[in-house]
Amino acid sequence: MNAAVPAPRKLRLATTSLAGCFGCHMSFLDIDERLLDLVDLIEFDRSPLTDIKHCGPCDIGLIEGGLCNAENIHVLREFRRNCKVLIAMGACAVNGGLPAQRNHIDLGQCLQEVYLTQPGLVGGQVPNDPELPLPLDKVHPIHEVVRIDYFIPGCPPSGDAIWKFLTDLLKGRTPRLGHPLLHFD
Amino acid sequence: MKQQTLLFDGLPVPFEEGQTIMEAAMAADIFIPHLCHHPEFKPQGSCKLCTVKASGRYVSACTMPAKDGMEVENNSPDLNDKRRTMLQMLFVEGNHFCPSCEKSGNCMLQALAYELEMLTPHFPQFFPNRPVDASHPEVLLDFNRCILCELCVRASRDVDGKHVFALSGRGLKKHLIVNSESGRLGDTDFSMADKAAHVCPVGVILEKRKGFAMPIGKRRYDVDPIGMQVERLANRSASEEEV
């Protein structure tokens, strides 16, 4: 009669930063003491916060950053395979953002200028270690490569916006960002 | 004579003979999303954001005259979906990188994207290569953000009488050009005193040395969403456009 109702299973959340600046992750931490409420509802899988290197089966994946190299695409596909719901978090994931500002420059010329011809460089060389992921010709937003379920724009989205979005999602509501939480800058 | 009225989403709204659907809506404090419309200039109906369904047909509210008894569908899921799709196409066609844009927070394109809850550009980005023109001592032209609304073209031609701007090319190749032999703004008689310097709804025509004057949180569309600013939009004058 009085058997304890088992606590609902915690949802597993994975996060990663691809071609981003970790600003969205910092903004995620800006939910401050609400993190304590959040960890009652979720547990972290792969994330810079746990240092788990590969994503296991998850309920929610939060992706910061766009795609600027081959490794970004591998990681994104790993997240898509494992996450039931995949969310693009921040301007770079949503539309390429700052890294995509190189898209009108030829990649070869860009590498040449940064590593070889820039004033003040002596004996520079374009990095070619086989361990380095190859850069993509252009930077792409993540929805151009895998299906994305939700988008949280902003550079970065505020802690309040991320909190509103996640709590809507965790409580089974359609996530919605109104004025002033929805912004692109 | 009997007062003429039309129905906006079922709401009767009086109007005066000669008013367009847009003018009748604005006078009644009803918001119809728009980009190329400006109360001071002749409407041309090119951006299609103001598309409404009048008596069952899709029309541009800024060019269609209001008629007695007309039923206008405006704020409906169907129309707002279409408008959002048009915004998404505008966003991917240019380079709209809001975090580095001086117009951010005061930009109508951005404000409409907020109003219509556009969370993603959805379509593949074009990432066009459009060099900026910094040749003018007072004004920077950043073509990356041009949405081809022709407000600067109309202002310069119809009010300033200078014909500084025009659109050239067709279809995907259509783009804003400057009327000087070099094609550079610095070689025209354009000045900050021109109407055309103050009409851009996005961040193409920018006064130099004035960027980011207003802190985030206090900019025009930080304060109220664009849908709540109908009265200001209806009464705006191009010389006061800039913050």
Image: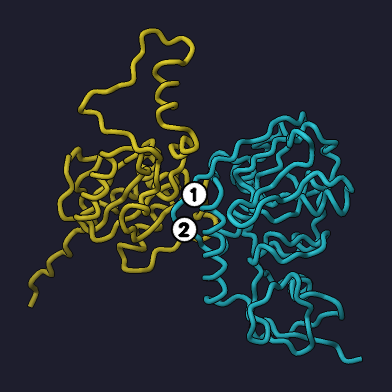
Chain colours: A yellow, B cyan
Dot 2: few (<14), some (14–19), or many (≥20) neighbours within 10 Å? many
Locate residue B203: give its quadrant: top right
Check disc 1 and give the amino acid type. Answer: Phe
On-image quarter of the C terminus of chain B: top right
Residue occupied by mark 2: B119
Residue occupied by mark 1: B126
Label 1 or label 2, whichever comes before in sequence order: 2
Check disc 2 and give the amino acid type. Answer: Leu
- Tag 1, which chain? B
Which one is in front in this view, the residue at disc 1 or the one at disc 2?
A: 1
Dot 1: few (<14), some (14–19), or many (≥20) neighbours within 10 Å? few
Label 2, secondary structure: give it.
Answer: loop
Vertical order, A182 against B179 (above or below): below
Query: In x, y percent, where is residue A28?
Result: 36, 45
Residue at x 25% of width, y 39% of height: A71
Query: In x, y percent, where is residue A152?
Result: 42, 54
Q: Is residue A32 visible?
A: no
Label 1, secondary structure: give it.
Answer: loop
Q: Is residue B30 left or right of residue A45?
A: right
Which sits in the foreground, B90 or B233? Answer: B90
Residue at x 34% of width, y 38% of height: A136
On-image quarter of the N terminus of chain B: bottom right
Count of number-bearing discs: 2
Q: Is residue B161 left or right of residue B112?
A: right
- Tag 2, which chain? B
